[in-house]
């Protein structure tokens, strides 16, 4: 089942047992964030807070929509028990078959419309998610829509936004992000404000598309349609010509000012650490807030094993695979494990060796180097089984010859916790690749060790007999 809105998805989570509904009143000031953080760390269900201190029961907060593979599977219309490989395959199939959005004139997100001074950001139950955050973050599980004024290209992205005052937000799009590049190159350079819309609580696959690792100039709205198997319905904003998902819970319209900044951060980010200090962020001026009746604010309680550890990791892995394929790398599978906080990737190849390892490292750091740790394994290692990856690393990575490092400046991931403040300021960093493949020059017949596992060291006849009679031996699984 594919969902047209957030509410249908919530109902499906209720039916599958992947939702906790908190009826007890919870404070927006840290308590809500602490509960949500612990739920993530326990691989627990999504959380729907029905009553938030200082707010009417007409508004509520839904947290951690897709922070587990079970919930990713449900969002994609798969059984909750689908394997990670099956989830990857379903996403890849949808991505390969984009469906263009359609414009409508009436929409649930227009049930309540407030403009001008009536568009008060404090009317929304925005939580203070972590101790030490610079403020209350309204934009965590959002869909941010912007447009390149010159080419007409519309970008969807997922960016953090903090409440600055009743009518302003301040945000932190990285300079290398699509939003950051378009704003600096096409609006700041011309002294023009940038129209922006922040949709909150869309259908889950539209949020997937916004968070996806996608090419500059790509159409995330069509990606969302491909994942859904049908078009996303879009409606025009009240105060700009931007189109937003019609079934959003909340839409915040406004513009980013080219000549003003606002203090933003620090913030407990997806790597699992509070990053940076309070600094200058882009300043967004609100022009309208529209929402459904009884709106539900969707939130990602960012940190260790949050929603990005599944969504961003999934699309990022597929983007890495395609990029390596384009450069002639014999890649088989790519996995970005949730525990790696989108800083680590595992890649399997048909054949390895130092030449392949160096090429992988060069390809994945030539433009934006978001990952700092890479593991390269042979095709007989299941990249989705981290126990087997660790075994390959422990036994096949040569401690002197199997470790490759590349240094760079101007394209490092500034949210990498182990980088110093000076390194972050200059976007200076490094990526290490652990080559866990057999050397290409080794003879597979005489020099490569035989793995002592059922599928490697026994004949097909013996394997088939054992598997056929497994239950008769007394084993239950």
Image (cartoon, rainbow, N blue to C red):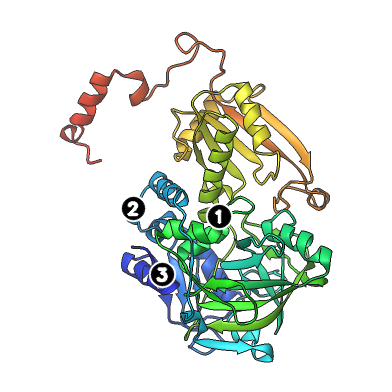
- Residue drawn 23% across and 19% down? 461
Instruction: Point out which mark residue 4 bears.
Output: 3
- Residue drawn 73% across and 65% down? 266
Q: Is residue 232 visible?
A: yes
Q: Please determine whether, in this image, residue 187 is positioned above or below residue 28.
A: above
Is 371 placed left or right of 90 in the picture? right
In front: mark 3 or mark 2?
Answer: 3
Binning the other alpha carbons within 10 Å of mark 1 as few (below 14), some (14 to 19) or many (20 upward) gives many
- Residue drawn 65% across and 66% down? 146
| Total marks placed | 3
Q: 151 or 15, which is in the foreground?
A: 151
**Residue 122: x %, y % from top left:** 64, 85
**Residue 128: x %, y % from top left:** 63, 74
Instruction: Point out which mark residue 381 bears.
Output: none
Task: Give the labeled residue for mark 2.
Answer: 81
Instruction: Point out which mark residue 212 bears.
Output: 1
Is 340 placed left or right of 472 in the picture? right
| Mark 2 in CB contact with mark 1 (< 8 angstroms) | no
Q: Is residue 306 visible?
A: no
Quarter of the view holding residue 7: bottom left
Binning the other alpha carbons within 10 Å of mark 3 as few (below 14), some (14 to 19) or many (20 upward) gives many
**SS class, disc 1:** loop
Indicate which disc, 2 or 1, sits on the residue closer to the N terminus: 2
**Residue 126: x %, y % from top left:** 60, 78
Marks 2 and 1 sit apart, C-alpha to C-alpha, by 23 Å
**SS class, disc 2:** loop
**SS class, disc 3:** loop
């Amino acid at each position: 089942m594919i969902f047209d809105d957030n509410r249908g998805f919530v109902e499906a989570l209720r039916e599958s047992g992947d939702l906790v509904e908190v009826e007890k009143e919870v404070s927006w000031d840290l308590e809500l964030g602490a509960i949500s953080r612990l739920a993530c760390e326990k691989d627990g269900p999504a959380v729907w807070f029905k009553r938030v201190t200082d707010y009417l029961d007409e508004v509520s907060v839904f947290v951690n929509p897709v922070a587990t593979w079970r919930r990713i599977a449900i969002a994609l219309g798969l059984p909750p028990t689908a394997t990670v490989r099956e989830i990857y395959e379903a996403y890849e199939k949808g991505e390969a078959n984009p469906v263009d959005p359609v414009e409508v004139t009436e929409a649930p997100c227009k049930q309540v419309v407030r403009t001008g001074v009536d568009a008060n950001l404090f009317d929304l139950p925005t939580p203070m998610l972590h101790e030490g955050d610079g403020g209350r973050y309204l934009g965590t599980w959002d869909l941010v829509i912007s447009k390149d004024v010159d080419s007409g290209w519309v970008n969807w992205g997922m960016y953090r936004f903090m409440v600055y005052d009743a009518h302003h937000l301040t945000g932190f799009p990285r300079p290398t992000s699509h939003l950051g590049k378009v704003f600096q190159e096409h609006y700041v350079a011309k002294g023009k404000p940038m129209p922006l819309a922040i949709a909150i609580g869309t259908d889950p696959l539209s949020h997937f598309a916004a968070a996806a690792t996608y090419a500059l100039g790509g159409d995330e709205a069509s990606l969302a349609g491909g994942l859904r198997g049908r078009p996303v319905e879009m409606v025009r904003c009240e105060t700009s010509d931007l189109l937003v998902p019609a079934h959003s819970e909340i839409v915040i319209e406004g513009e980013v000012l080219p000549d003003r900044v606002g203090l933003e951060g620090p913030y407990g980010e997806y790597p699992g650490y509070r990053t940076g200090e309070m600094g200058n962020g882009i300043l967004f001026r609100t022009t309208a807030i529209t929402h459904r009746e009884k709106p539900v604010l969707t939130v990602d309680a960012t940190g260790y094993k949050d929603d990005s550890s599944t969504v961003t990791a999934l699309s990022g892995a597929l983007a890495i695979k395609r990029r390596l394929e384009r450069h002639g790398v014999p890649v088989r599978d790519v996995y970005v494990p949730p525990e790696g906080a989108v800083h680590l990737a595992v890649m399997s190849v048909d054949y390895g060796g130092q030449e392949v390892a160096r090429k992988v490292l060069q390809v994945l750091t030539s433009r934006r180097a978001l990952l700092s740790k890479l593991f390269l394994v042979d095709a007989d290692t299941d990249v989705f089984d981290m126990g087997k990856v660790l075994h390959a690393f422990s036994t096949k990575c040569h401690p002197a010859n199997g470790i490759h490092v590349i240094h760079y400046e101007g394209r490092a991931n500034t949210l990498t916790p182990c980088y110093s403040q000076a390194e972050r300021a200059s976007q200076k960093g490094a990526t290490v690749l652990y080559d866990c493949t057999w050397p290409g020059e080794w003879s597979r017949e005489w020099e490569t060790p035989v793995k002592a596992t059922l599928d490697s060291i026994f004949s097909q006849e013996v394997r088939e007999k054992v598997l056929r009679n497994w239950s008769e031996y007394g084993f239950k699984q």
